[in-house]
Image (cartoon, rainbow, N blue to C red):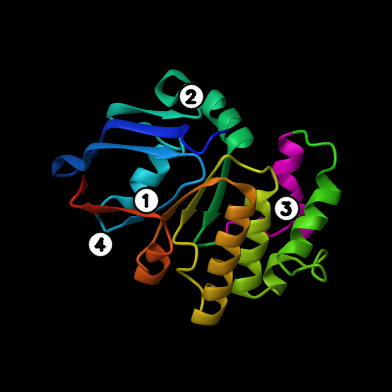
């Protein structure tokens, strides 16, 4: 994939929901493109629509207006199963709350997306990724026995194991202390660069946003 190839296009996106006061418009007429290998931060105050936009870009929700093309596919034209299949093959996620499955070990959590994608070497690959994020001694540990920083590193290994074309991160350091957060940031950019994937992250942290090549700033649901 060349570095000038578009991996995502957002075309006149809008999102409205019904509330007790009538129709609430969260996003207005959002347009931008993302290229392969690019790193982009979505910034803005609380309530500006950042997480809503991230959910639309990843196909977790559908827009009220406009459309998104992800890896050449119009998300509006796919049903829920089709969008899930595309995500499984092309997309990685890192969440503020880690979203690890509590009844699975670190190794099993990392293996899961590889198994869902029918990768042949899921276990060996998961072990290699945990080694890479510095958790080679933690294969059999359950999430509750890991620190927040360790859990987020497991989540990074899980996000990258399928070698996604695009990685979405929603406040990836939001629930970590500064030291753990800095370590996760370094790993995120290091792994992303090595993987040549496109990185899209939502953050309140100016230092984290400044590490990205580009920033998209939302205010009142509009792209400034």
Q: Is mark 3 on a helix, strand or loop?
A: helix
Mark found first going from the N terminus, 2 or 4: 4
Left or right: 162, with 165 as reference point = right
Residue 139 percent coordinates (x, y): 81, 64
Q: Are marks 1 and 2 in contact (CB under 8 Å)?
A: no
Residue 152 counted in the magenta span: no
- The residue that label 1 is drawn on is 51
Structural crowding at the residue carrying mark 4, measured as other residues with C-alpha within 10 Å and reported as few (<14), some (14–19) or many (≥20): few
Q: Which of 101 and 48 is in front in this view?
A: 48
Q: From the viewer's perspective, is 54 left or right of 179?
A: left
Q: Earlier in the sequence, mark 1 or mark 3?
A: 1
Q: How would you rate the neighbour count of disc 3 (Cα within 10 Å): few for under 14, some for 14-19, many for 20 or more?
A: many
Q: Which of 159 and 100 is in front in this view?
A: 159
Q: How far apart are marks 1 and 3 (CA)?
A: 24 Å
Magenta segment range?
A: 98-117
Kindly give the residue lying farthest to the top in the view shown: 77
Compared across the picture, whether 141 is left or right of 163 comes to right
Q: Mark 2 points at which residue?
A: 72
Say if mark 3 contacts mark 2, CB within 8 Å: no
- Judged from the image, the secondary structure of the residue bearing numbered disc 1 is helix
Task: Classify 10 Å Cα crowding around label 1: few (below 14), some (14-19), many (20 and above).
Answer: some
- From the top left corner, tell me how far across and down residue 81 is, in percent: 56, 25
Whichever of labels 3 and 2 marks the residue nearer the N terminus, that label is 2
Q: Dot 2: within a 10 Å radius of its alpha carbon, few (fewer than 14), some, or many (20 or more) residues?
A: few
Instruction: Identify the residue under disc 3.
Output: 110
Mark pair 1, 2: CA separation: 23 Å
Mark 4 highlights which residue? 45
Separation (CA) of disc 3 from disc 2? 27 Å
Q: Distance between the residues labelled 2 and 4?
A: 31 Å
The residue at the point 74 percent across, 42 percent down is 114
Determine whether label 2 and label 4 are within 8 Å by CB.
no
N-terminal-most mark, 4 or 1: 4
């Amino acid at each position: 994939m060349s570095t000038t190839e578009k991996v995502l296009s957002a075309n006149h996106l809008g999102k409205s929901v019904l509330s007790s006061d009538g129709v609430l418009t969260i996003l207005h007429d959002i347009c931008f493109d993302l290229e392969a290998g690019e790193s982009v931060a979505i910034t803005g105050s609380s309530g500006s629509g950042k997480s809503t936009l991230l959910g639309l870009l990843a196909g977790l929700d559908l827009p009220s207006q406009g459309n998104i093309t992800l890896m050449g596919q119009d998300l509006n034209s796919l049903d829920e199963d089709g969008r899930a299949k595309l995500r499984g093959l092309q997309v990685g996620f890192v969440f503020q709350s880690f979203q690890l499955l509590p009844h699975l070990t670190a190794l099993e959590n990392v293996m899961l997306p590889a198994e869902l994608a029918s990768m042949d070497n899921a276990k060996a690959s998961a072990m290699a990724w945990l080694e890479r994020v510095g958790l080679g001694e933690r294969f059999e540990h359950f999430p509750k026995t890991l620190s927040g920083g360790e859990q987020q590193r497991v989540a990074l290994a899980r996000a990258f194991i399928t070698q996604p074309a695009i990685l979405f991160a929603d406040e990836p350091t939001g629930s970590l202390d500064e030291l753990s957060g800095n370590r996760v940031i370094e790993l995120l950019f290091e792994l992303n660069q090595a993987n040549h994937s496109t990185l899209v992250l939502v953050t309140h942290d100016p230092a984290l946003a400044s590490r990205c090549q580009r920033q998209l700033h939302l205010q009142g649901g509009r792209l400034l």
